[in-house]
Image (spheres, rainbow, N blue to C red):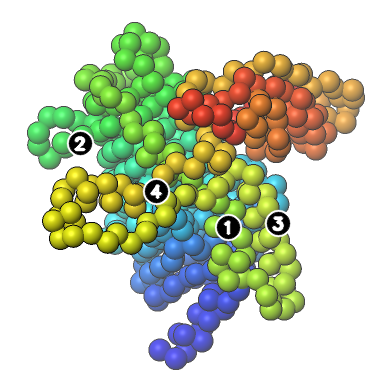
């Protein structure tokens, strides 16, 4: 036991840098972990990640040269992962870069059918595939899976994960990819602003909501809306049951325009969308889930400032830069002051009073935060567009493709900041960023309150 504690002690230090390793026993992480190579949890191993921990992956680096991608680091779970944050103290799986981009690292791979892993109140971002699930049944709850190059979740070969209460947004190809044999069960998730919300292949059969009583019963309540190509695309040999979901509209014809199934190609099966969810998803609950703050990413939050030496000092400096890079787009949940109540026994037992006091303790929406554009009262409206002007195509290496710029818009509709989320090369990336800074939007509101919001701009070269 003493040897094990000595072995783990660097992971409780202010900042730990891991060039890659294989975990064969129980191990607990807390603080800031900078990853430079694949981390593999062996079948006998168990990795516990405590609330507030930041696991930051160095971009395009894999000192282990293993896994699916020999050039990018991965977290490979062949044993068990328990990553349980809280709504006020999330766990972050992110990029170590000052200006992070899609595909800086490869992602989390979970693949033990005998041990159930769990990820809860976490953020998974800037990977190739955020989370890949193969032949196992983990639970992914109340997490944000965003800004991943290919997919937010890649579900493969008979995997049956439970996905509950997540926000799956801004992933390059699809929010969720279901490959042959995948059987995920989705409840209370919001899937938006991906190229495709969910796509199913082969014999995959995702359960997005099934109101028929029985072993497959699922209340659904998933939201699929504002995905750029399709909300759901069925390229499989199985029907997709998507009952009791919200689609951004109750007009069936409009919903079907954003669904691709047998009506578009009769070699595939249908997507069953009836009945449609009457009241829509609980957007306020999702807003509160997405609230965070730079404090959650700062060294002070995880006791990482102070006395690091050598490489640790440089790591802390980079961590501060990473916190700064994220500070513009995330803010802390606001918890109303809960003052002690002095009252008679009769008043305390009054159900109405109890309900009011419980309401006070709930996390409320902070209107000073930067909101996802999906939460606005109306879709973002561009008032002024600016096209990049290419002065020298030779400097752009004659490359062609799409650049994505992530912008923060202030309460007046002006651009506060613009960062490259997905680029082509330095020349074109800078042209797109400079053009984005000149855009203006109609000011955004939530429940009539003027707010700052973030959205993505796309530039074709």
Q: Nearer the viewer, mark 2 or mark 3?
A: 3
The answer to whether residue 284 is above or below residue 58 is above
Contact (Cβ within 8 Å) of mark 4 with mark 2: no
Tag 4, which secondary structure? Answer: loop
Q: Quadrant of the C terminus?
A: top right
Residue carrying label 1: 295
SS class, disc 3: helix
Residue hosting label 3:
321
* C-alpha separation, residue under disc 2 versus residue under disc 3: 43 Å
Image spot of residue 157 (x, y percent): 33, 43
The residue that label 4 is drawn on is: 363
Q: Give the quadrant of residue 413.
A: top right
- Crowding at dot 4, Cα within 10 Å, few <14 / some 14-19 / many 20+, comes out as some
Q: Are marks 2 and 3 in contact (CB under 8 Å)?
A: no
Give the alpha-carbon distance from disc 4 to disc 3, as whole Å: 29 Å
SS for dot 2: loop
- In the image, residue 41 sits, relative to residue 220, either above or below, namely below
Few, some or many residues within 10 Å of mark 1 (<14, 14–19, 20+):
some
- Residue 126: image location, x then y, percent: 58, 46
Q: Which is more N-terminal, label 3 or label 2?
A: 2
Q: Position of residue 131 (x, y in %)?
A: 45, 48
Q: Earlier in the sequence, mark 4 or mark 2?
A: 2
Residue lying at 52% horizontally and 20% vertically, measured from the top left: 379
Front tag of 4 and 1: 4
List the residue tagged with mark 2: 218
Q: Between disc 4 and disc 3, whose residue precedes?
A: 3
| Residue 3 visible to the viewer | yes
């Amino acid at each position: 036991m003493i040897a094990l504690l000595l072995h783990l002690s660097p992971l409780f230090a202010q900042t730990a840098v891991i060039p890659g390793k294989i975990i064969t026993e129980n191990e607990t992480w807390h603080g800031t972990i900078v990853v430079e190579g694949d981390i593999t949890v062996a079948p006998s191993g168990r990795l516990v990640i405590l609330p507030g921990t930041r696991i930051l992956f160095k971009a395009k680096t894999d000192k282990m040269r293993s896994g699916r991608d020999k050039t990018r680091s991965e977290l490979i779970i062949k044993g068990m992962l328990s990553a349980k944050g809280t709504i006020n103290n999330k766990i972050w799986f992110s990029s170590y870069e000052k200006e992070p981009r899609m595909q800086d690292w490869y992602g989390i791979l979970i693949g033990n059918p005998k041990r159930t892993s769990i990820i809860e109140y976490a953020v998974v971002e800037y990977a190739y595939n955020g989370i890949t699930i193969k032949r196992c049944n983990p639970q992914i709850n109340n997490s944000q899976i965003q800004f991943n190059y290919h997919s937010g979740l890649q579900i493969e070969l008979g995997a049956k994960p439970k996905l509950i209460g997540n926000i799956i947004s801004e992933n390059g190809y699809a929010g969720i990819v279901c490959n042959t044999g995948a059987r995920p069960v989705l409840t209370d998730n919001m899937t938006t602003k991906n190229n495709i919300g969910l796509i199913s292949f082969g014999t995959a059969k995702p359960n997005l909501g099934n109101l028929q009583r029985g072993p497959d019963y699922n209340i659904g309540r998933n939201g699929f809306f504002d995905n750029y190509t399709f909300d759901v695309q069925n390229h499989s040999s199985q029907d997709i049951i998507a009952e009791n979901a919200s689609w951004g509209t109750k007009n069936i014809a409009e919903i079907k325009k954003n669904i691709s199934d047998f009506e578009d190609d009769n070699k595939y099966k249908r997507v069953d969308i009836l009945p449609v969810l009457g009241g829509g998803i609980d957007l306020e609950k999702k807003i509160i889930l997405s609230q965070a703050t730079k404090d959650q990413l700062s060294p002070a939050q995880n006791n990482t400032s102070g006395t690091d030496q050598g490489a640790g000092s440089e790591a802390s400096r980079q961590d501060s830069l990473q916190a700064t890079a994220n500070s513009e787009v995330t803010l802390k949940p606001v918890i109303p002051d809960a003052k002690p109540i002095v009252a008679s026994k009769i008043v305390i037992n009054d159900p109405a009073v109890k309900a009011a006091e419980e309401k006070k303790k709930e996390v409320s929406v902070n209107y000073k935060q930067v909101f996802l554009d999906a939460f606005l009262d109306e879709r973002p409206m561009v008032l002024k567009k600016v096209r990049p002007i290419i002065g020298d195509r030779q400097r752009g290496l004659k490359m062609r493709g799409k650049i994505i710029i992530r912008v923060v818009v202030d309460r007046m509709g002006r651009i506060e900041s613009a960062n490259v989320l997905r680029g082509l090369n330095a020349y074109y990336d800078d042209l797109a960023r400079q053009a984005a800074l000149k855009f203006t939007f109609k000011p955004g509101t939530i429940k009539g309150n003027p707010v700052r919001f973030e959205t993505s701009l796309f530039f074709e070269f």
